[in-house]
Image (tube, helix red, strand yellow):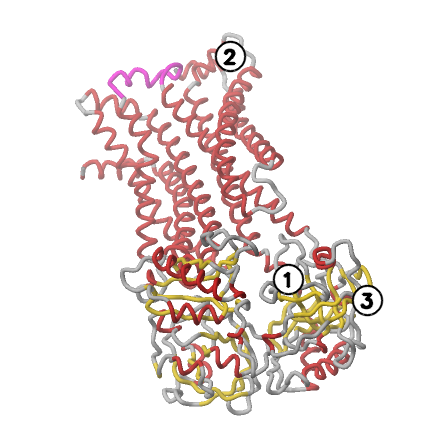
Amino acid sequence: MHRDFVFALRQLRTNLRFSLIIVLTLALGIGATTAIFSVVSGVLLRALPFPESERLISLQTVVFPHGEAATKEAGAGTIEDVSFPDFFDWRGQSHTLEAIASYAYGTSRKFTPAGNEPPTMVEVEYVSADFFRVLGVTPMLGRSFVLDDERDDSRPIILSHQFWESEFHSSPDIVGKHITVSDRLATVVGVMPAGFSFPDLSHPPSFWGTFWLASASAVNAIGSPQKESVSLAAERTNRAVQVVGRLKPDVSVAQARAEMNAIQRSLAEQYPEDRNAFGVEVRLLLDHVSGDFRQPLYILFGAVTAVLLIACANVAGLLLARGFARRPEFGVRVALGARPSHIMRQVLIESTVLACCAGVLGVGLAFVLLKTFLGLTPVDLPRLTQVRIDGIVLGFAFLVSLLTGIGFGVVPAWSASRSDSSGLWRAGRGISGGRNEHRLRGMLVIAETAVSLILLAGSGLLIRSFLQTMRVPPGFDPHHILALRLGMSTVEYPEEKAPLFFRQLLPLLSAIPGVESVSSAYPIPFPYDNASRFSIAGRPADPSDLPVANRATVGPRYFETLRIPLLKGRTFDQRDNQNAKRVAVVNQEFAREFFPGEDAIGKLIQPDFLEYGYKPTWYEIVGVVGGIRTTDLTEGPKPQFFLPYEQASHWPQWVLLRVSREPRAYVNSVRAAVAGLNRDLPLFAVTTFDELIVRSTVFARFEAGLLTCFAVSALLLAAVGLYAALSEMVARRTFEIGLRVALGAQRADVFGFVVRRGLVLAAIGLTVGLIGFVIFGRVVADMLYGVRALDPFTVAAASVVLLLVSLLASAAPAWRAVRLEPTEALREQ
């Protein structure tokens, strides 16, 4: 074995140029595969950074359409977040969970530093008392939350390590101190250790507070103001929080799922509000965190692996050609007594050494590719901070190198082992020798072409889907709109003062040169929508089963600012204030669904504001506007109703400006106008509508682009493989070609013979690839919009591209064959 290894190194050194070509080809494939695997490992495979993270689970409510039988299992309904009452019941009744906790989506709060520094906006997470206990992490300073903190008027908070360092200079005396949040005092009870972050695993919030703090600040879990006398827990249909639990030892996910579904079915029978929510989705927290990105990342990993396989096929073809050239050597060794197994072992060792050299170079390349990948990856990809090249990834790279060396070396090794002493004579005759090797080379080219077609057509599907998505009109004009939020606390701006502030601010913003229109709204399209229950006058309805539509509160000229078309009636203006008759505007989807065949103008609706402590109020519909897409371009407009901000000032507003130039150029002017009314009011979440729409499609763009890169790489490698195969065929059959020409064959016939051989291989590869593409199309079907999984245009385009590339790859060897002089070809033999 040692002598074989030394001999392999000598062979590589002797054929240095040939060895470098193979090593570089494989290094590209191994490096790209290792880089993508490090992302898959960090996002999907690596355990969450919490003690015994395999016991952590996510719990969500499963809501079924009204009238569905309550005996159905969870999984067939719609998965939604959890209401506080359901969470409290789960916490009290579960016996399979060691602990259970709830948390809300991150929100922003105004933080007022000590001294003369201006207020800033910080990210906050609101959690229940057992949140840190569930995750198995304790503060490095102070204590965790306890149940009493959910009712403690001292508003306890726990700081993140990063916020503690940056704002409080790592003061060891911070515990027990008071800080000002949203113009109220909060008490620091702890500081989390460095590196801890949840639910965002990449960027920790500034601090965590209890849900009581959210309510006492007149702000509920989703950031909306509410009356102090009303508890969000009174609403079972207001599913606003997510839930995480820790399984007891030796309890499986299936056992917890069975218990939680039994509890929820009992609640559905007990409470009318829960009668359609009789299921619970229980899965590992790791799967919940990475769920939306699991399939796309696995597809990318499969694509880059396919590129590596094509590289291996190319290398195997090169080694087959080299093995044919070495047949005299193998014949001599057989004549001297070498067994076929010895020759096979020698060739396998040579290929493995090549692969290991490529693996070392590939790991270095993987560091560069990974850095580039992370720079291009969308920021919402979870656990990006966990992505790195560690021992597991290096082990994967070693395993891939080893398997690659064996994989591309098996066929050449088997071919070499079949050599005998007669190879000494046959090596000099290209007319009859090496037919088996040539057949194997053709099979490799067919496989490369098939895989290239799958990747090329697959990337074509994703590109077409992305382009179709970007062509979808959102229902409004998103260009030249600046959107931002103001850090208004309900202490400084209670409900009766907030509309007055906007009444003063909007004219100041309108006076800025270049500003065409100004308004306000909550929510705005593309960050999120806001579903709300409502009643329709004259129609009896079960209070526990009211109709649902998206709701938005907007300022005057909202529809004009976004250029949402008015179809009937009127929109809002300055007349629709707190003292005027309550009015509403609905979109055409709302009118069609709830007033089919009727005129929606003049109808009365009553939004469900019980959770905010307001008396039921009827709103008269005065206008119908066009529908807009609110969260995703691939989803059509949903039924939506709009209320004037001054008549329903329950939510903090976004400020919207339509401008004539680049929107961000107006930020300083807006900041100056706001400072003229309140110099301590910070601006945050500054963005443009173009950016919001691009952000909603960023991962689709990224995935389509990356898969296209892999497809182009596969196409080029396949072209190189076909070129090499035909070049080797021409070189091997030089005598035959020269003899044909000498006997009268036309050069056009020789050219056609070589090109025909290349196109036949490509056609067979296309046929095999079409079969594989049928399977691939089904895998990506759920990721497509406006394009069929087996779109004939995409398949035809990919096939034409492959045939053209195959034609070009065949032309060069064919031209070389045409230029052969018969006398020279015959003299060489």
| Residue 463 visible here | yes
Which residue is found at the position 40% from the left and 57% from the top? 283
* Residue 811 as seen in the image, left or right of residue 27: right
Quadrant of residue 427 in the image?
Answer: top left
304 in the magenta segment: no
The answer to whether 418 appears left or right of 203 in the picture is: left
Extreme residue in the right direction: 569
Where residue 753 sits in the image (x, y, percent)? 52, 18
Question: In this orientation, which residue lies closer to the viewer: 461 or 608?
Answer: 608
Pick the quarter of the image with the N terminus.
top left
On screen, residue 808 above or below 123: above
> Separation of disc 1 and disc 3 at Cα?
24 Å
Where is 539 relative to 452, above or below?
below
Question: Nearest the camera: 238 or 185?
Answer: 238
At mark 2, the secondary structure is: helix
Label 3, secondary structure: give it.
loop
Kind of residue at disc 2:
Val
Q: Amino acid at mark 1?
A: Pro
Which mark is first along the chain, 1 or 2?
1
Quadrant the C terminus occupies: top left
Q: Quadrant of residue 441?
A: top left
**Mark 1 = which residue?**
547
Nearer the observer, disc 2 or disc 3?
3
Can you tell which of label 2 and label 1 is closer to the viewer?
Answer: 1
Q: CA distance from mark 2 to mark 3?
A: 86 Å
Q: Is residue 190 above or below residue 408?
A: below
- In this figure, which residue is indicated by the disc labeled 3? 570
Instruction: Please give the range of residues in magenta.
Output: 419-433
Q: Between disc 2 and disc 3, whose residue precedes?
A: 3
- Residue assigned mark 2: 741
Could you tell whether 392 is left or right of 40 in the image?
A: left
423 in magenta: yes
